[in-house]
Image (spheres, rainbow, N blue to C red):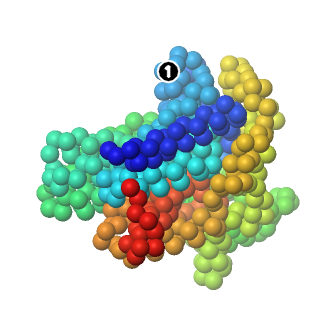
Amino acid sequence: MKAAPRFLLATVLIAFAATRVALYTGVDPIFDADTYKYLGAADSLWNGLGWPPVFAKMHDGGGALHALPGYTWFILAIWGAVGRPTLSGVVLAQAALSGLALLAILDFVRRRYSFAAAAAVGLLLAASPSLAWIDQLLMPEAAGGAVYALAICLAVRSVERATFDERAALLAAICGALMGFGVLLRATAQVFVPFPPLVALMGLRAKRPAAAWIGVYSVTFVLSLLPWMAHNHQLHGHWTLTASTGRNLYFSGVWSDTIDRRAALDGLGSVRDADVDSSYFILDEQFQKFLDSGLDIRQADAAMARLALQEYRKAGLARYIEGRAAILAGLFQEEAFGRGNMTLAGRLSWYLNNATAGDPMRFMMEERWNYRLSPAVVALMREGREQHAGPHSWFRWWVDWLRFDDLSLALAFLAASAVLLASARRHATALLCWAAPVYAFLAMYTVLGAPLYRYQAALHGPMLVMIALALWQAWQKLRARGAWPAAE
């Protein structure tokens, strides 16, 4: 390895480590409202109390047959490793996992392009404040993004010899287990499951080796899901991972007002304001009506899907398309729904002050999900807030100068996709691994989603990989034309 590439690689790793250490030492672990769901489950299991209501029979706020156990198991693994509950240990583990994913991505880019391309990708990823924020957030997004990156990079490595041998079988098995864990972290990761097999089909080409690879991958993928499916069978009588498609379909329609919120509230006998936040109330109350009629949770979810489709037909095609366009645009401009700018720049003080970890929000979430955190975990939360005073000028500078999100990021990603598609044969693997999954997620999200900034930030990794590769491609073309000096 020449001195220049070694220096570039070292710079990337130092930048990544420095940003995570700076954020870790300056800000306590950041809470989302849903953090209480996963943290409460870990706390309950740690104390031998079993799964709390929101992971058992309680449906409110995305509970039973919607909430998945992966992040709770991740938290418990860290607690088990250190021998006690810890919040800082969890975010450190997330940063370490993201660091492994970064190394895997750098290796992918170096092997398929060059050290210079790997440095461009690495610097863009390491400098991203949104990715560092995700690492500091006590939510599944950080671990989920890292798990996908590791899995897809392993898939590429497993087929680089274009044969199915013991090494390929082992990597396929690990890849399947990783993707299974990714789905257990977030159900939306199901949309990424086909991409490692597609990599195998591209790399192995011959039918038998590809079929063997996909078979091994499928076995370990399914085996990783079976424990939770067995849990659901025991509680609900169904061998299923989740049953929330109907809830998501209905909620997305209410959020976009394709399903008229005012009419829905009137039908429920509520006089509350029909703002976008009333969508949560409408969802929970409508779902409860189906449960009260004698349906179980799975049947009620199917009824929600039928109701959503009925309401969509009533609204008409034009209004449906308008609503879907608003949902997609809202992922990159959340304030369009009247909730304010939820990006790092828009709500930086709110994120850094971490008000969601305060007692008022904790009391509300404990009441909502019918589980009270143990005194030990409450003490950890208060200790973290006391140790980290709040907003810090260095992080404000970082966000002000290096943030890259919302519409500008979306447009840059579209442009990068077009640049690499112009040389599709050369960039086919990169497009399959990093661009296609983003578009698949956006398609799924457009139908079933509702805008939250952490959903957007979870896509920043693959989007930034594509943007960096496109910039490197443009630099290569300029150098070939003599408009840029060659790198040593």
Depth check, front residue: 70 or 11 = 11
Where residue 48 appears, as percent x and y from the top left, is 55, 19
Q: Which of 124 and 357 is in front in this view?
A: 124
Q: Which of 204 and 232 is in front in this view?
A: 204
Residue at 65% in and 78% down: 322
Left or right, residue 430 beside residue 323:
left
- Give SS at disc 1: helix
Asked if 339 appears above or below 151 in the picture, the reply is below
| Residue appearing at x 51%, y 58% in the figure | 464
Apparent side of residue 65 relative to residue 198 in the rendered image (left or right): right
Residue visible at 75% across and 59% down in the picture: 341
User: Is the residue 376 above or below the residue 193 in the image?
Assistant: above
In this figure, which residue is indicated by the disc labeled 1? Answer: 80
Residue 62: tell me if it is visible: no
Q: In which quarter of the image is residue 273?
A: bottom right
Three-letter amino acid code of the residue under disc 1: Gly
335 to 105, vertically: above or below: below
Quadrant of image for the C terminus = bottom left
Judge from the rendering whether residue 369 lies leftward or rightward of residue 90; answer left or right.
Answer: right
